Structure formats: structure tokens, C-alpha cells
Image (tube, grey):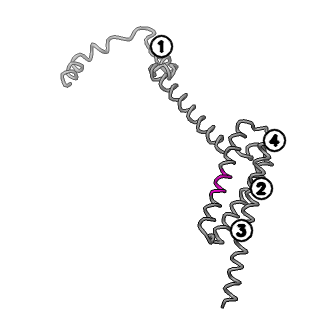
Amino acid sequence: MKDLEKILRDHKDQFDDYEPQDGHFENFLEKLNHQKKRNVFESIPNFLKVAVIITFVIFSGLVGYQIRNMQGNHLGLGAISPEYKEVEAFYTANINNQLGMLKQLGNFDKKQHQSILSEELKDMDERYSQLKKELKLHPDDDRIIQAMIEYYQVKTSILNRIIEQLYLIKKQNRNNLNTAV
């Protein structure tokens, strides 16, 4: 490196004698401007462009699939119209309240009765799942919509009867305990 500096110092007078050619600075500026105008995507290799496009398409497909599955899994009365959504919300809240009351009232006298109830409720829920599948295939079929509403009504009615019976049994047991004491 020091040799180069020495050479430049020794021959300094020779470097100052020569002027650049006419138009040199214009050519230099033109080349600079040409590089600035160059598209960013020109510097990326073609295989990388293809890889990015394929990745984007796959990612978009997966997101679309997930969204469709989330919508398809929750196809119920609420997906048909806002009125049915209100009906579904009303019955669902009512059924959840009734199930909470069943837990508060306690267990049945016999485990057999409790297992029968849970089996019946499970069977009803399976039928409702079948209705949801049918509704997905035939969303405009009024018979399916009516059957789904009747499912909620029947389930509510059954749970009401069970709660009333349990309440009467509890009341009767308390009366028996009070008279026995």
C-alpha cells in the first residue's frame, strides 16, 4: 500500500496533465440515472420470484380453507338469517341455563336415571348434528329449519320436566325429613 502511495506522489504531475474527454461527466450522470431507474424486481432471480408466488398461492389457499371450515362447522340456524340467529341464541341460552339448574339440583337418586338422561341428550345432539349437515346441503329447506327449531323446543321441554320432577322430589324429601324429625 505504501508503494502505491509513493508512486502516486512521485508521478503526481503526470496525473494533473490529462483532462477527461468531452462528455465524460454527462455519460457518468446518465449511467447513474439509468441505475436508479432500474426496477427492483430485475435484480431478483427468476427462481426466487417463482418460489414467492408459489408460497403466496399455497398460503392463500390454506387461509381460505381454514375460513371455509370455520364457517362450515358453525352452520346452524344463525347462518340462515338474523331472526333465526336470535331464535338459536334464545334457545341455546335457555338450554344452558336449564343444564346449570340440573347441576345445582344435584344428582338423581339412581345413577341409572342419570345415565339414561345423558344418553337421551347425547342422542338428541347427534340428531341435531345430522340436521346441521342436511341444512348445509339444503339451506333453503323450511322442513329442516322447522325441525331444528322443534329440536330446541323439545329439548327445552324435556329439561323443564326433569327440573320440575327433581324439584318435587327434593321438596318431598325435605318434607319427609321435617315430618320424621
Question: What mark, if any, has residue 26 been given in the picture?
Answer: 1
Q: Please, what secondary structure does the residue beneath circle 3 have?
A: helix
Q: Estimate the spatial distance between the alpha carbons at disc 2 and disc 1, rounded to whole Å.
A: 87 Å
Q: Residues within 10 Å of mark 4 (few under 14, many from 20)?
A: few
Residue 163 - label? 3
- Which residues lie in the magenta part? 119-125
The kind of secondary structure element at disc 2 is helix
Quadrant of the drawing holding the C terminus: bottom right
Marked residue nearer the N-terminal end (1 or 3): 1
Separation of residues labelled 2 and 3 (CA atoms): 15 Å
Amino acid carrying mark 1 in the image? Glu
Mark 2–mark 1 CB contact (< 8 Å): no
Q: Quadrant of the N terminus?
A: top left
Question: Where does label 2 land, which residue?
Answer: 153
The one of 7 and 92 positioned closer to us in this rendering: 92
Residue 8 rendering spot, x and y as whole percentages:
24, 19
The residue where tag 4 is placed is 142
